Image (cartoon, helix red, strand yellow):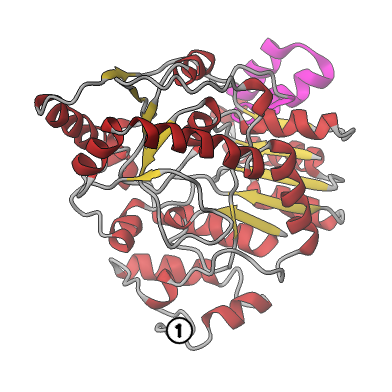
Amino acid sequence: MVISGHEICGVIGDLADEFERRGHEVVTVAMEHRFFPRRYDYDQHDFPVSALSRRFGMRRLWRRVFQVLWEVDPRLHHAVERRLRTRVFRGANLYIRVWGMIPFDREGLEAVKRGGGRVATLFMGSDVRDYGVFRDQYEVARWQFPKEYLDVPLAAKVVALRTHERYSDAIFSVPDQMGLALRPYHHLQVPLRLDSLVHAVPGRPVPKVVHAPSAPHIKGTDVIEAALATLRAEGIRFEFVSVRDAAHDELLRILTDADVLVDELIAHGPGWLSFEAMASGCAVATRYLEDSPACFRPPVWCIDEHNVVDRLRTLLTDLQLRIRLAEEGRRYVHEHNRIEHVVDGMLAKVEAGPEASTDYVPTFLTNSYAPRSDEEARTINAANALVAEETWYRSQVAGSAHDGLVF
C-alpha cells in the first residue's frame, strides 16, 4: 500500500506503523516535519531525486541533474516526475491520501485504480477549505484571515475535491472544510496511538490552563487570551501556559500536567490537539458543532466568540466539572480514537465503496453558495464536469437550487 501526502500531526507515520504492525508492506511519500521527525520512503517535494537516489544512490548528483533539467526544460522535468510517481503508485492495493493539492495527484489515483486498488482520501483542512466559502457558510466575517489564506486559488481546491470525489472509494473529512464538496463523505476520526500518551488528571483547585495554537490567527487566540485576561481581572485564579512552536513530545508532557486545554474558536473542533488533551487528562474547551452526527459526540466544553468569557468562568471555577470532563474524555478517545479502531473503520468504509451510507451530505454549494465572480463560477462548473457522470452526483444535485449546478 501507499500512504502519500503532507504530514499532519504525525498521521502518515502513525498509519504506516499501524499497517506494518498488521503485516502490510507500506510505502510512504511525504515531506519531513519539524515536530514529527520521521524518515519517509520518498520525499513529496523532491520526488524524482528521492526515487532515483533510493535506487541508484548519488543523491547530490541527481539533485543537480534535476535542478538543471528544471531550468532547461520544465515540461521534460514534469514528464519524468510523472513517470516516476506513477511507477510507485502502480499496483498498490490501497492508496491513502492525506491532505490536498499534491503534484500529479490525478495520475497517481488513475494508476491505483487501473491496477484494481482502492483509495481512501483524508481531507484535513486548508487543502480544501476555501476561507471565503468558509466565511460565508459559517458567518465568521468578523475574523480577519491572513492574506496568504485568502489568496490560494479556489480552482486548486475545487479541482482537488472533484478529483477525489471521482476516484476515491471513501472520503473522510469534517463540514467546515467541505463547503465546496458535492459528494457525501464520512467523518474523519482522529487516530491516536494511546500508548504514547500519558493520562493524568491533576485535579488542582487552581487549574493550569494551556492554549497552544498552531496558527493563532485562525484559532481565535486574541479573543481567547482577552477572555482569560477578563477572568483574571475578576479575581478568578488559574495558571496560564501559552505554548508556541513546541516539539510534539514536549507539548504532550505539558498536556499531561495541565487541567484545561482551551483550543479554538473559529474552526470546529475538537481537532487533533483537543483529542490528545482528552487522552492526557485535560478538560477541553473548544468550538463544536452541536448538530454533529451520532458518531461525533465528544465530551468537550463548547465555547464560541460570544460565550467564551461566561463558559470559561464556569469551567475554571468548577473543579468537579473539570474532573468529569477529563475522565469522560479519556473514555471517549479510548472508544472512538484508538488508531486500531480508526483503521478498522476506514478499511470497512473503503471496502463498502462510494455508494455506502455516510455521515455527511454536503448541501452548501448546491443550495446556498453564490460565486463571487464569473471566473469563479466557470471554475466550479469546469471542475464539476469531472464528476458529472457519477451516480452519486446525479442524485446529489437533482433538484438543487442551482438547477443541476450550473452557475
Q: Residue at x 50, y 14 (%)?
A: 253
In the shown orientation, is residue 104 left or right of residue 240? right
Work out whether residue 76 can be spotted: no
Q: Residue at x 35, y 56 (%)?
A: 134
Decide whether residue 48 is among the magenta residues.
yes
Crowding near pointer 1: few (<14 within 10 Å), some, many (20+)? some
Image coordinates of residue 282 in percent, x first then y, are 45, 29
Q: Which residue is mark 1?
A: 400
Decide whether residue 34 is among the magenta residues.
no
Q: Residue at x 67, y 69 (%)?
A: 357
The span picked out in magenta is 41-67
Residue most extreme to the front: 320
Quick one: quadrant of the C terminus?
Answer: bottom left
Q: Say which of 275 and 334 sits in front.
A: 334
Dominant secondary structure, magenta: helix
Q: Residue at x 41, y 58 (%)?
A: 290
Relative vertical location of residue 202 with respect to residue 216 in this rendering, above or below: above
- Disc 1 marks a residue whose amino acid type is Ser
Image coordinates of residue 215 in percent, x first then y, are 35, 31
Image quarter for residue 392?
bottom right
